[in-house]
Image (cartoon, helix red, strand yellow):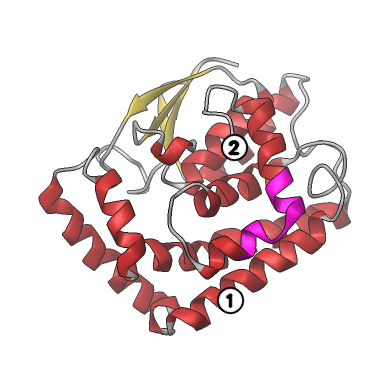
């Protein structure tokens, strides 16, 4: 497979892969599959085909949405006779993986936005990191856009304890699915594991003390999972203490 060009924010905030869990998810997938890639720093959505990050250039053509990119790469790996991450996954495990991924990306994600942008303690931490990639005067504008998005989606209408409780329940469900296995569906890493790792970095990495972070820390298997993936595919990040 030809080298892929990955467009995403340039920093590794708080010693994590990326501020965006979707960027972290896609780059983790590229590392797990050993697909050659190079990154281009992008702190804006300029050029992004869907107006979001991450996005890629694949054979010179732009493509957006981390999941759609991964699905295309899975097809290409299979066509080249290489092992796609989800190759051989049973129909039942594929269904479980999809439900777990959608729980994280379409539910838990908004609780993360809530903690980072709507609550003052989280915003104070995120604000300083955002200033590294966009002008400082833009950050309050981003906050207003995020809180508006959260209210339209629904999570922003909840009290903090309600939002954190929902997030904790999502983490509990995924922790139950993981159990004592190395990865979500067994001994081998799959696409869903890229998503789970990315979101665990997003909640355990930033120095934001919250009930959601403490809920993640309370699941020993989730903490161990993060450490396991990080030590194998993200050796260039600082070691966890």
What residue is at 52 percent from the left and 28 percent from the top?
238
Give the residue at mark 1. 166
Is 154 or 173 nearer to us in this picture? 173
Taking 47 as reference, is 92 above or below it?
below
Q: Are the residues at dot 1 and dot 2 in contact (C-beta closer than 8 Å)? A: no
Q: Earlier in the sequence, mark 1 or mark 2?
A: 1
Q: On the image, which quarter does residue 25 sit in?
A: top right
Q: Is 223 covered by the magenta stretch?
A: yes
Q: Residue furthest left?
A: 137
SS type, badge 2: loop
- Of the 4 image quadrants, the one containing the N terminus is top right
What residue is at 74 percent from the left and 31 percent from the top?
84
Q: Is residue 103 left or right of residue 131?
A: right
Residues shaded magenta: 215-224
Structural distance between the alpha carbons of marks 1 and 2: 28 Å
Q: On the image, which quarter does residue 160 sit in?
A: bottom left
């Amino acid at each position: 497979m030809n080298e892929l060009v990955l467009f995403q924010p340039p920093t590794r905030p708080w010693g994590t892969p990326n501020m965006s869990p979707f960027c972290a998810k896609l780059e983790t997938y590229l590392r797990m599959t050993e697909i050659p890639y190079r990154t281009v720093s992008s702190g804006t959505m300029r050029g992004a085909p869907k107006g979001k990050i991450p996005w890629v250039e694949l054979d010179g053509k732009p493509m957006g949405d981390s999941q759609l990119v991964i699905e295309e790469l899975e097809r290409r790996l299979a066509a080249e006779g290489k092992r796609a991450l989800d190759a051989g996954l049973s129909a039942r495990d594929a269904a479980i993986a999809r439900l777990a991924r959608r729980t994280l990306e379409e539910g838990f994600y908004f609780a993360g936005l809530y903690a980072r942008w709507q609550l003052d303690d989280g915003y104070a931490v995120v604000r300083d990191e955002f200033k590294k990639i966009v002008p400082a005067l833009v950050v309050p504008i981003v906050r207003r856009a995020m809180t508006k998005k959260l209210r339209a989606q629904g999570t922003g209408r909840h009290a903090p304890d309600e939002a954190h409780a929902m997030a904790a329940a999502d983490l509990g469900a995924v922790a139950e699915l993981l159990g004592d296995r190395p990865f979500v569906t067994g001994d081998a890493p799959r696409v869903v594991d890229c998503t789970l790792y990315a979101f665990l970095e997003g909640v355990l990495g930033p120095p934001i003390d919250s009930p959601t972070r403490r809920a993640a820390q309370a699941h020993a298997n989730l903490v161990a999972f993060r450490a396991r993936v990080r030590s194998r595919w993200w050796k260039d990040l600082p070691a966890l203490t």
